[in-house]
Amino acid sequence: MSADLNLRISPRTVQQETVDKLRLAILSGLFQPGSRLIESQLCAQLGVSRPSLREALRSLEAERLIEIVPNRGPAIPALSWEEATAIYEVRELLEVEAAGRCALRIPAEQLRELEKSLLAFEQAAASHDGLAQVMTAADFYSIILANCGNPILEEVHRGLVARISFFRGRSMSLDGRAQSSLAEMRDIYESIAAGDEKAARKASKKHLLKAKAAAKISMENGA
Amino acid sequence: MSADLNLRISPRTVQQETVDKLRLAILSGLFQPGSRLIESQLCAQLGVSRPSLREALRSLEAERLIEIVPNRGPAIPALSWEEATAIYEVRELLEVEAAGRCALRIPAEQLRELEKSLLAFEQAAASHDGLAQVMTAADFYSIILANCGNPILEEVHRGLVARISFFRGRSMSLDGRAQSSLAEMRDIYESIAAGDEKAARKASKKHLLKAKAAAKISMENGA
DNA sequence: GATTGCAAGAATGTCAGACAATCTGGTTGA
DNA sequence: TCAACCAGATTGTCTGACATTCTTGCAATC
């Protein structure tokens, strides 16, 4: 037996690393929406071979983070306001359900984690760090989704949030949006902590509607 | 039917063909759940090179139709009853919403398509052809989802249905399930045709609950 | 001057082959 | 019996190559 504490049963492969790096790059807004990605360039920048890169691109395509058109290659899709609206509507369905279920079944330990993530968001909101706000807000929701008792709900939600996170980054930059977002999230937290399913659903729905409205404003301004 | 106005048809690539063939093979139950897929064998059977095959496998992995464990390769996941339940619950969320929206906005032409697909399912139900039943039922739903006015809802739903279709195939084989399924689907169709949102939601919910129950029975018997 | 046509270059789609790392199953030795 | 070990099988990854398809700039034509 080796002395290494190798309890991780998932060795990280080049393809996984590549997917993660590219996903982070895309979510950070490193690439302009609509711009094309050149395989040879990415290979050089990431230090991987084309086959590995292409596998990673297929994974990202399935996540809808890139689009691959035959004979034209991968590109960053430009998210239209219609699509964004559609995503917000589906998120509403999922998140309201998840918040309600979560209120009924979250363990005490996870509730503390949820509180922690709320505090982290509070800090981020005060700091005016857009990326930190997006990340901590995503943490908050991922804890709720992870404790709704339905892993599929969580999986589907993750796929949607990834696509919309740079939207969230924009709407957070609106004056006061981060603060009101914080208040809404606190409502959700308190409803869940109280085990009040109806209140959790209501608070979650309210939060999402406001987020959607904020995103719309920032989109109209920024477009 | 209208002639193909789409002049920029994407050329079908080897990878797309491979994905389609494999998906069909998996949904047809050609591979045993839990069994591993050997890349070299698949390459020989499909007549494609390993890089192309591996790209296709990454796409299918993202669809959750296969699982790829590092250093062990792709395998057909064994869907547990818990996961199946979770999928049914999320499908309920999505399909109820879609049916309700569809009732309010489906164009007359699409409504005729929906009727056609219902008739096709009727034929399949009478024929005791399991695969045909699954396929025509999937058509019926895909028309509803395509006309709910939210492409994201459609996209998410497709990802779930793929995974559960072989479940559906099983539950259809229960005595009388196809017939009662037909009756429920006709309810949905008529509610939509009448433009009655509430009735469409109700009928859709009822159908899904029954389908879930049937799937549970067949799972307990077959396991 | 605007439009068309074409040719050179770039980028993708696909394949073949290779090799190391890892897993698997059976054999051997204690 | 059980553990160590070895050979084959399989995957992860890379290199290199070539045909096909897109892009772009330039020239020819009206």
Image (tube, coloured by chain):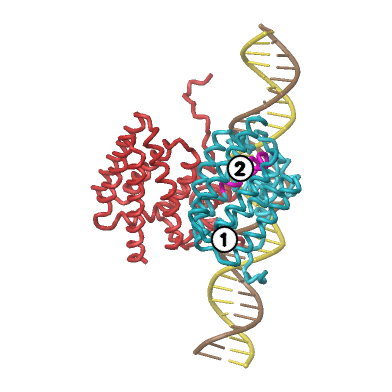
Chain colours: A red, B cyan, C brown, D yellow
Chain under label 2?
B
Q: Is residue A213 left or right of residue B72?
A: left
Where does the magenta region start and end? B159-173
Instruction: Give how far apart the Cα atoms at labels 2 and 1 are.
Output: 27 Å
| 10 Å crowding of disc 2: few (<14), some (14-19), many (20+) | some
Point 54% across, 43% down: residue: A15
Question: Is residue B150 or residue A2 the one in the foreground?
Answer: B150
Q: Amino acid at mark 2?
A: Ile
Residue B164 got which mark? 2
Q: From the image, tell me which residue sits under label 1.
A: B193
| 10 Å crowding of disc 1: few (<14), some (14-19), many (20+) | many
Chain under label 1?
B
Q: Is residue B138 left or right of residue B129?
A: left
In terms of sequence position, does the residue under pointer 2 or pointer 1 come before the other?
2
Which element carries disc 2, helix, strand or loop?
helix
Q: Are marks 2 and 1 on the same chain?
A: yes
